[in-house]
């Protein structure tokens, strides 16, 4: 890649990141203990962010483009999709702002994201890769950054690397003013690594975590059963966290896995209570698993090398089992997400993607592959 090239293309349809066309957000609070003037200066934030994406994160300053049965991010050297930055100044005290941060008040603190899906029906969507909302207090006691980014380009690991680079560049500009060159601490890469060496033809995997649906008829709902649970929020106190962490250590699972078990059991117990007739029906647990370590993917890679893990039991079984037993099932499901499984998932998705394009080219009303997510849930610790 040369800096004077009129355009540079980065493929996202040839790697597992393609399916994760969604926006993710973080809320970051910074306390201004001395109430100093110029704390998180807006112009400095904008300038450093634009320099960072134009020079080091070119796909972030590019546009999505669908063409020739593939989806790319295209970076143009003469026009930039700079991250939009909005601001607000609130007349509230520091404790009130902190409560909004703790409660994840996205409407107040996070920039609203547009529809994130790139399709061949809308081949050139004008959507930003990253959006930033800066919230100041009249008292100058704190600043909150709300950052929303497109998940096909970055997962959580790549996001924090991006933030570390942004912080370093912003600090350098603050201390030294204009700069001709600055080496960021974690230079990113964007080409998804070859994972074909994980393919083992002697092993085959089923992928119940994906379903084929008619997109015109699909609606988000719980399956099976006619009941609908709109939202599940699990609030965990400090004391409950301590008890769950000890349980997790005792049985050799992670805290996250035992939290998943609490959610899975709680949702199915509620569903069974609402409709006892569904006890023998299937309950499919799914979650995303970051496969960076297992696949040997560098933390500097901007992509989403994730796999979907799944485990299937009946509604009644999950409602009756103890949390620790369910945590072991979750642990086993996540444990199968090896490099071989990641490769199998990729091959399955790539085959289905090609099938969808073939159906379209030949006038067939084929189905599309979608992830299975049985219930929206969040945990507040």
Image (cartoon, grey):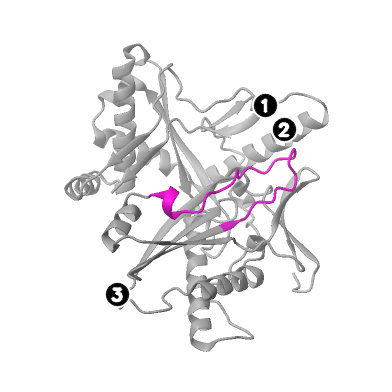
Residue 270 x %, y %: 30, 24
The location of residue 343, given as percent across then percent down, is 59, 45
Q: For the residues marked 2 and 3, what is the alpha-carbon distance in whole angstroms?
A: 56 Å
Q: Earlier in the sequence, mark 2 or mark 3?
A: 3
Q: CA distance from mark 2 to mark 1?
A: 7 Å
- Within 10 Å of disc 1 (Cα), the crowding (few <14, some 14-19, many 20+) is some
- Asked whether residue 185 appears in the rendered view, the answer is no
Q: Is residue 95 above or below residue 199?
A: below
Q: Position of residue 292 (x, y in %)?
A: 50, 55
Q: Could you tell me how many numbered marks the image carries?
A: 3
User: Residue drawn 34% across and 32% down?
Assistant: 264
Residue 322 lies in quadrant? top left
Report which residue position mark 1 lands on. Answer: 367
Q: Quadrant of residue 58?
A: bottom right
In front: 206, or 238? 238
Q: Is residue 111 magenta?
A: yes
- Mark 1: secondary structure: loop
Of all residues, the one furthest to the bottom in this rendering is 176
Q: Main secondary structure of the magenta part?
A: loop
Looking at the rendered image, the quarter that the N terminus falls into is: bottom right
> Is disc 2 placed on a helix, strand or loop?
helix
Answer whether labels 2 and 1 touch (C-beta < 8 Å).
yes
Write down the residue under mark 2. Answer: 356
Give the side of residue 27 with respect to residue 344, left or right. left
The image position of residue 362, as x and y in percent, is: 83, 28
């Amino acid at each position: 890649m040369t800096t004077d090239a009129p355009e540079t293309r980065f493929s996202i349809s040839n790697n597992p990141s393609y399916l994760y066309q969604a926006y993710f957000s973080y809320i970051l609070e910074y306390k201004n203990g001395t109430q100093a003037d110029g704390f998180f200066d807006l112009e400095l934030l904008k300038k450093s962010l634009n320099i960072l994406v134009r020079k080091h994160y070119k796909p972030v300053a590019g546009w999505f483009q669908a063409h020739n049965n593939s989806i790319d991010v295209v970076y143009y050297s003469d026009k930039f999709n700079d991250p939009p930055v909005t601001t607000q100044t609130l007349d509230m005290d520091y404790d009130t702002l902190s409560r909004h941060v703790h409660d994840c008040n996205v409407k107040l603190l996070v920039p609203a994201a547009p529809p994130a899906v790139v399709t061949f029906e809308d081949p050139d969507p004008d959507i930003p890769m990253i959006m930033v909302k800066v919230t100041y207090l009249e008292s100058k006691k704190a600043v909150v950054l709300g950052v929303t980014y497109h998940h096909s380009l970055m997962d959580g690991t790549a996001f924090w690397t991006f933030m570390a680079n942004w912080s370093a560049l912003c600090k350098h500009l603050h201390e030294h003013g204009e700069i001709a060159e600055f080496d960021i601490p974690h230079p990113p890469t964007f080409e998804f690594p070859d994972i074909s060496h994980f393919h083992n033809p002697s092993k085959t995997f089923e992928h119940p975590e994906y379903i084929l649906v008619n997109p015109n008829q699909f609606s988000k709902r719980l399956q099976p059963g006619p009941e609908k649970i709109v939202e599940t929020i699990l609030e965990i106190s400090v004391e409950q966290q301590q008890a769950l962490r000890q349980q997790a250590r005792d049985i050799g699972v992670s805290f996250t896995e035992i939290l998943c078990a609490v959610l899975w059991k709680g949702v199915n117990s509620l569903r069974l209570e609402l409709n006892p007739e569904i006890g023998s029906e299937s309950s499919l647990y799914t979650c995303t698993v970051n496969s960076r370590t297992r696949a040997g993917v560098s933390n500097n890679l901007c992509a989403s090398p994730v796999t979907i893990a799944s485990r299937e039991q009946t509604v009644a079984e999950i409602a009756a089992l103890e949390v620790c037993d369910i945590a072991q099932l979750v642990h086993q499901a996540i444990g199968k997400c090896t490099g071989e499984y990641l490769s199998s998932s990729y091959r399955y998705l790539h085959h289905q993607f090609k099938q969808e394009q073939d159906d379209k080219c030949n006038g067939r009303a084929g189905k599309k592959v979608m992830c299975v997510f049985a219930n929206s849930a969040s945990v507040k610790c």
